[in-house]
Amino acid sequence: MSKDSNASPLRLLVQVNSRQMFRRFHSALTQSPAWFFLVLLFTGGYQMLSFWLFYRGLRFVETFPGLGTLLTERLLFVLFAFLFILLLFSSLVISYTNFFRNRETMFLSSLPIPRETIFRWKFIESTLLASWAFVFLIAPLLAAFGLTRGVSWHFYALAVLLVGMFVVLPAVFGAWFAMVLARYLDRRSFQISIIVTGISLLAAVAFLMQPEPLTDEMLEIRVLAVLDQMLVQTRFAQFPLLPSYWLSSSVLNWAEGAWSTAIFFALVLLSNVLFFGFVCLTYTGQFLYSAASTVQSRSSIFGQWKWGLKSSRRGSENQMALGGLERFIGWFRWIKPDSRALIVKDLRIFWRDTTQWGQTLVLFGLLAAYIINLRHFSTQLTNTFWINTVSFLNLGACSLNLATLTTRFVFPQFSLEGKRVWILGLAPLGLVRAVKMKFLLACIASLVVTLGLILLSCRMLKMDFFRLCFFSVAIIVMTFTLNGLAVGLGTMYPNFREENPSKIVSGFGGTFCLIVSFFYILISIGLLAYGSPWVSSGDMSITTSIICGGSFLALSVLVGWLPFYLGLKKVANFEQT
Amino acid sequence: MIELVQLVKRFGDLTAVNDLSLTVPRGEFFAVLGPNAAGKTTTIKMLSGLLRPSSGQAKIAGFDVQTHPMEARKRMAYVPDFPFLYDKLTTAEFLRFTGQIFRMEEKVMLRNSDELISRFNLEPYLKKSIEGLSHGTRQRVAIVSALLHDPEVIILDEPMVGLDPHHARVLKDILKEKTKQGMTVFISTHQLSVAEEMADRISIIHHGRLVALGTQEELRRQSGVDGALELTFLALTAAEANLVSDHTHAPVTHAS
């Protein structure tokens, strides 16, 4: 039966998991070819679209006389620096989940496989999981950059090598952070530290990234000095010890034909990858067991202080007492008690899924930091065209963020409840009302974020009341639509076999939900922008505005209400069977 | 073959396993009984090296699972209450993977697997993907993969759950045969009939403590109750519960 009884355990694990992945693709292709080709089409379309956008953007920047090259370079430095931070955070979250919340890790720990080998395999897996999106995002940018600079083929070969090396460093640091967190932080303190870090980062970005105020006079006389002043806040991206700096420098120098400098930075990157990679692969594995054991053994970290113990004992004295959240939701007396219980349960489960909402917090936090900083541009943004463009881009960014949120958290809700149908399905509440409640809760929760961000954006751009109402109505409609779509498709394409919500999302329904959301946002923004009365120079007829507005509403009903309605119908039948 | 020496596991200020010491010799069928949250699964996790004890030692075939984990794990097999299986592999591929991980010789692996596959009626499922198997069939696959390398010690956590009466019987027969050949079985179960029928010795854990240990007859004497094991078990755990309630600050366990 064994063809290779002397194969190393790591090789066996790689073989087994590669086979699993291949089978997943194969079964997706054979069982649901429509879904497979839809994903393929969307992926290809996205790559082409982002390549075109990057290409047009870089060409536009390059047209600035005397400044184009400088601006492009700085853009690359900043982009890679931000992606490095995001990759670091993503690696941390994925490593933590993969090392300490993974059934395969537990299974392997009971087999005669050295812990170092288990760590190595889990590290490789985490690196691949964390960095594929980075590669997906960066590929069209590098291709567009190469095309604008007219580089030869070896630039692309080097870029592939450099990116391959680059992703290792955040993966190593992410794995180490995950180990430290597991060792020293429990869930509650992890949540608190994520929020504190998030708020601190937000404040730091909002404060540090604000540009210097400029006058028209300065712009006319000393352009280079002004540009330097404007770019001063982006200098952090050129900190020589940042891995993203080595990557950017190597890419830029190679594109310019400065081979020796490019090779120098590539070697700096390589030596760091080899050093940290070696340390990680040879020494970190020995801490995996103690960290995993600590995660399973620990009570609250606050228990080490007297006040923490007191608080814990107070809590355990009356464990059935109402929690703070229950008391808060209890104020909404017009909501039926069973619906309130469902809301409390859903909020608690969401709150306890720290590793997942942590990433959402980063995305919305970055968006909020950017919007807050718009206030500094208000003097420059006197041009109506730019104000309109920025405001619609804000609407797009906000709704795209929301789409990821609804797909990731709202879509799998019914699948997860389906497994617990013996509770909800048999309760007087019923599944139909439960789904409706989930829809309303998701809408209200996401409206707090999306409407808040849009109002903030309008305030920063000093928009008048009419425009504020326009954008507010637009985001409210889009929030309801995207949530309706996610709830509807989630009930139409449930997956009752999976416990893990992120795996539920990766099926046909989840992918379809994301793609439809994306196109809905794209078309909606187009319609709203084209039909808004202040965008054109005044020759826009009221009829066009009404047609565009009406089309947006009709599209929203079609995309949001229809799947929701069909989903509810399916749920009603589900109750009868 | 199995030795637990003053084993303690604390979760913060909760003590899940409290000063547990016992020895299970080679070839013994040893059953661990206890109410929910008694500390059985925590004990098993420490014994199989998945959880580090707060203090004390757990040894398999003379090897401390903490200091010599590889030596201990080579000699044991563990079937958890919800075993992990690679869903996209077929049954045959999964069994082959397990054999390779234990570095089994091909001949031995073929011989062992043929016999176990046949006894657990897994032939129709060998080429089938594990994801499509029923709960009971998955459990059979997990048990076969655990027995494949002929371990010296097998640790089973509720292995009968999901098995139909026929395959539960097959498992019992195999375990009986294997113990005669020298394999040590350490089983945690709530099915008292399994312990009653199979176990050479039984231990009862309650609130993380070993409250009784011995043959069925010895347990009966200890409890002072004649009759089925159920009565003995209830009497012993009730006595322990009363004892605990007398001590107001007794630890409350949360892991079983």
Image (cartoon, grey):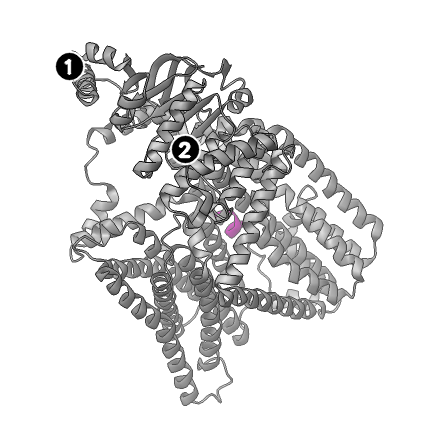
Q: Which mark is residue B225?
A: 1
Which span is picked out in magenta?
Answer: A203-208
Q: Which residue is mark 2?
A: A186
Q: Residue at the location (49% across, 65% down)?
A: A35
Task: Looking at the picture, tell me which residue is in the foreground, B48 or A270.
Answer: B48
Prevailing secondary structure of the magenta residues: helix
Q: Quadrant of the image for the C terminus of chain B?
A: top left
Residue type for callout 2:
Asp
Q: Is residue A204 magenta?
A: yes
Q: Quadrant of the image for the N terminus of chain B?
A: top left
Q: What kind of element bears circle 2?
A: loop
Residue type for callout 1:
Val
Q: Position of residue A552 (x, y in %)?
A: 40, 77
Q: Which mark is residue B9?
A: none
Using the numbered discs, state the Cα–Cα distance from disc 1 to disc 2 in whole angstroms. Answer: 46 Å
Disc 2 packing (10 Å; few <14; some 14–19; many ≥20): some
Task: Looking at the picture, tell me which residue is in the foreground, A246 or B67.
Answer: B67
Asked if residue A173 shows in the view, the reply is: no
| Residue A192 sits in quarter | top left
Q: Position of residue A95 (x, y in %)?
A: 52, 40
Q: Is residue A443 magenta?
A: no
| Residue B142 sits in quarter | top left
> What is the chain letter for disc 2?
A
| Residue A57 against residue A131 in the figure, above or below | below
Q: What kind of element bears circle 1?
A: loop
Q: Residue at the location (65% across, 59% down)?
A: A139
Asked if residue A52 shows in the view, the reply is: yes
Q: Residue at the location (69% across, 40% down)?
A: A273
Disc 1 packing (10 Å; few <14; some 14–19; many ≥20): some
Q: Residue at the location (57% across, 53% down)?
A: A22
A248 displayed left or right of B90: right
B133 displayed left or right of A72: left
